[in-house]
Amino acid sequence: MAVLITGSIATDHLMTFPGRFADSLVAEKLDKVSLSFLVDELEVRRGGVAPNIAFGLGCLGLRPVLVGAVGPDFADYESWLQRHNVDTSGVHMSDSRHTARFVCTTDSEQNQIASFYPGAMSEARNIELKPVVDRVGKADVVLIGANDPGAMLRHTQECRFRGYPFAADPSQQLARMDGDEIIPLIEGATYLFANEYEAALIEQKTGWSSADIAGMVDTRVTTLGPDGARVERRGEAPVTVKVAEEDRKADPTGVGDAFRAGFLAGQAWGVGDERSAQVGALLATYVIETIGTQEYELARTHFLERMARTYGDDAAAEVEPHVSCPRP
């Protein structure tokens, strides 16, 4: 299965605040917020929704094709991704802008305050998918993640025109879009990924009901935080999976990206929606146990043991022939 992953490519600057944001907020003064938090730690990590998802797919043994725009400072990052089985031939290099930056502070209750500088990402709208697809042979699915809004629309329109199945994953960009901008990103999608809040935001901004959305896409995949994830495929009963128990909670950044990687891996393997969601939920657990979105390491034996412990021996046995991790 040839999987193209489009979306932002960025570096993450992740900070940890030892207190609670809520303790510094004054309800009557929220229209005049002026806050500064003294943080304990700063981690500079590789990030961006597209490389995060591509990295997860590569760690599970697939070879996804990354599509996005970067600056001349991308060389080390590109080498890292290539060593983790990611095809970077679809990446556009800007002559004048730096690679995008994500800056995020997490408090003691896992609440987050974040900012995003797009940089070279604004040039992603210049990327045509067909030359990339021609080079790799075919596109079984194109995931269209949060990116420059013009790029998201262009890639979605091209997928419709050329008949490429696509997964709509607007995520963070939903906050800045209105309903008329969201609708063309979703209609006709093979998959629609969202968390509970994003799903509600889509309904609010488009005026669609949940039933309307179900009729627009083949499969809705909704992550439910500590309650796991729900998969609703048209014409089939919904499937809900629980989260995998984590050994520790370090940082939730990138958990949703890892879930998408695991789910798409399961779909590529042909193991069905329930198993795909279970692989996604387990991969997400690896992320929450580490600081950074691409700092986890997968060992095949350990992954399958955790799969069996959480979802049963049958689940582990079904995915076992497909899982290929960097470590045995």
Image (cartoon, grey):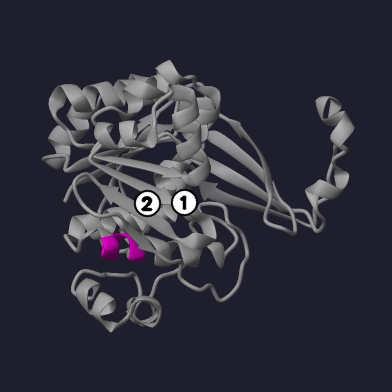
In the image, taking residue 13 as reference, residue 10 lies left or right, namely: left
Q: Is residue 289 above or below residue 317?
A: above
Q: Residue at x 85, y 25 (%)?
A: 32
Q: Residue at x 20, y 74 (%)?
A: 318
Q: Is residue 228 above or below residue 71?
A: below
**Percent position of residue 9, x then y:** 46, 38
Q: Is residue 179 above or below residue 173?
A: above
Q: Is residue 276 magenta?
A: yes
Element assignment for label 1: helix
Q: Nearer the viewer, residue 83 or 215?
A: 215
Element assignment for label 2: helix
What's under tag 2, amino acid-wise? Arg
Q: Which quadrant is home to the C terminus?
A: bottom left
In the image, which disc is placed on residue 164? none
In the image, taking residue 73 as reference, residue 42 lies left or right, namely: right
Q: Name the chief secondary structure element in magenta.
A: helix
Q: Residue at x 53, y 41 (%)?
A: 197
Circle 1 residue = 256
Q: Is residue 270 above or below residue 53?
A: below
Instruction: Find residue 116 and report its image quarter.
Output: top right
Magenta range: 274-278
Q: Residue at x 86, y 49 (%)?
A: 23
C-alpha gap between disc 1 and disc 2: 6 Å
Contact (Cβ within 8 Å) of mark 1 with mark 2: yes
**Percent position of residue 15, x then y:** 71, 51
Q: Is residue 123 visible?
A: no
Circle 2 residue = 260
In the image, taking residue 24 as reference, residue 154 lies left or right, namely: left
Q: Is residue 138 visible?
A: yes
